[in-house]
Image: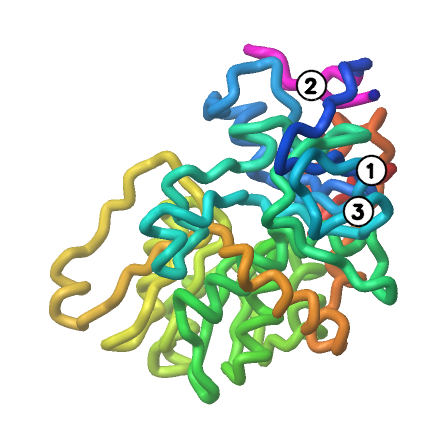
């Protein structure tokens, strides 16, 4: 099969022939329909963040496809079933899984990190967490549910616990942040979107934002505080400490700061402000598999929209062009590698 492989020290993926995996007991072989191109992979390519599986490794963690074959003991799936692969696969047995926080599984397998991922024609994964895709949904587009929708759902619903009437500000309206806007609006919040690109802010308005601010010109945090009197919840979906502090500064006393973006840098937190204002700092990682069917049903009902957030589609042979577009900070929400 063809796959885009990361070799140690390389900043481009090499598209080449690799062996077709065979499903073992409890596993399924999935024919990939599409795999989302995520900024997370640039951490491995450009910033020296190591993968748990030593290179060569196949990246890609936002995957939809069809079951090609199942291994011994798999009875819940059969060839031809349409599925989404959660970005984090879980053990279902550890303390985190049994307490309802499977996204923090002690034995987690991150697709495209611990195991080979979806920039390939086929992928072998444990079958237990696979999520069925109804026939009335476009299979390629549903790949974004695996991360670009599930991560924002978890951040808004499970971590921030956004309530109707609250004021929520979202810093960063890329492939994940734009869906934080969608879910926060669905939760009944007055949503403020902040980004450097007017095109992303225009889409944020279409997807439920009540107000937008163009970052980089004036003191956006001060403008937001003046306009709202302080936000109830602030999301940072970029991964830059300076933006995290800016987002935190928009909060009213008792407000909640939710960190969705990843950064390897330390965050110089203003301790006195947190104490005197009783601010909450909340981390948010991925999404537990149990929540995926809820998201699928929200898409089926038309409450959450997929098509506006998918900007480009690339064949596997052009995957490095997709990453170059991300590096150039082009106004992209989600690109897909499609098969």
Quadrant containing the C terminus in the rendered view: top right
Q: CA distance from mark 1 to mark 2?
A: 22 Å
Tell me the residue that label 2 is attached to. 5
First to last magenta residue range? 2-15
Which is closer to the viewer, label 1 or label 2?
A: 1
Label 2 close to label 3 by CB (< 8 Å): no
- State the SS at label 3: loop
User: In this rendering, would 185 be left or right of 154?
Assistant: right
Report which quarter residue 111 is drawn in.
Answer: top right
Residue 78 disc label: 3
Alpha-carbon distance for marks 2 and 3?
28 Å
Spot occupied by residue 161 in the image (x, y as percentages of width and height)? 41, 74
**Which of 238 and 108 lies nearest the eye of the viewer?**
108
Give the foreground label among 2 and 3.
3
**Residue 193, how many percent across, how many down?**
55, 68
Q: Earlier in the sequence, mark 1 or mark 2?
A: 2
In this rendering, would 10 be left or right of 144? Answer: left
**Neighbours of disc 3 within 10 Å: few (<14), some (14-19), many (20+):** some
For marks 3 and 1, the one nearer the N-term is 1
């Amino acid at each position: 099969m063809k796959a885009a492989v990361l070799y140690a020290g390389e900043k481009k993926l090499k598209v080449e022939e690799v062996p077709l995996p065979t499903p073992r007991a409890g596993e399924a072989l999935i024919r990939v329909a599409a795999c989302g191109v995520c900024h997370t992979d640039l951490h491995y390519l450009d910033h020296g963040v190591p993968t748990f599986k030593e290179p060569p490794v196949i990246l890609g963690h936002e995957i939809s496809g069809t079951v090609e074959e199942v291994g011994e003991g798999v009875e819940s799936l059969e060839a031809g079933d349409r599925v989404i692969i959660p970005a984090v696969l879980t053990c279902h047995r550890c303390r985190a899984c049994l307490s309802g926080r499977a996204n923090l599984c002690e034995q987690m397998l991150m697709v495209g990190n611990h195991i080979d991922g979806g920039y390939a024609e086929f992928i072998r994964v444990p079958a237990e967490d696979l999520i069925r895709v109804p026939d009335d949904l476009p299979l390629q587009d549903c790949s974004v549910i695996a991360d670009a929708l599930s991560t924002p759902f978890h951040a808004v619903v499970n971590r921030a616990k956004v309530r109707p009437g609250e004021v929520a500000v979202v810093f960063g309206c890329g492939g994940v942040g734009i869906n934080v806007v969608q879910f926060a609006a669905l939760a009944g919040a007055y949503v403020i979107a902040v980004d450097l690109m007017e095109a992303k802010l225009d889409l944020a308005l279409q997807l439920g934002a009540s107000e937008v601010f163009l970052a980089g010109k004036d003191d956006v945090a001060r403008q937001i505080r003046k306009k709202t009197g302080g936000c109830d919840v602030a999301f940072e979906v970029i991964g830059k400490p300076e933006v995290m502090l800016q987002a935190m500064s928009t909060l009213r006393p008792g407000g909640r700061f939710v960190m969705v973006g990843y950064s390897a840098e330390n965050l110089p937190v203003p301790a006195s402000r947190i104490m005197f204002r009783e601010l909450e700092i909340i981390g948010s990682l991925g999404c537990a598999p149990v929540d995926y069917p809820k998201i699928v049903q929200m898409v089926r009902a038309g409450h959450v929209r997929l098509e506006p957030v998918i900007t480009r589609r690339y064949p596997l042979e052009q995957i490095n062009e997709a990453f170059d577009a991300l590096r150039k900070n082009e106004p992209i929400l989600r690109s897909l590698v499609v098969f």
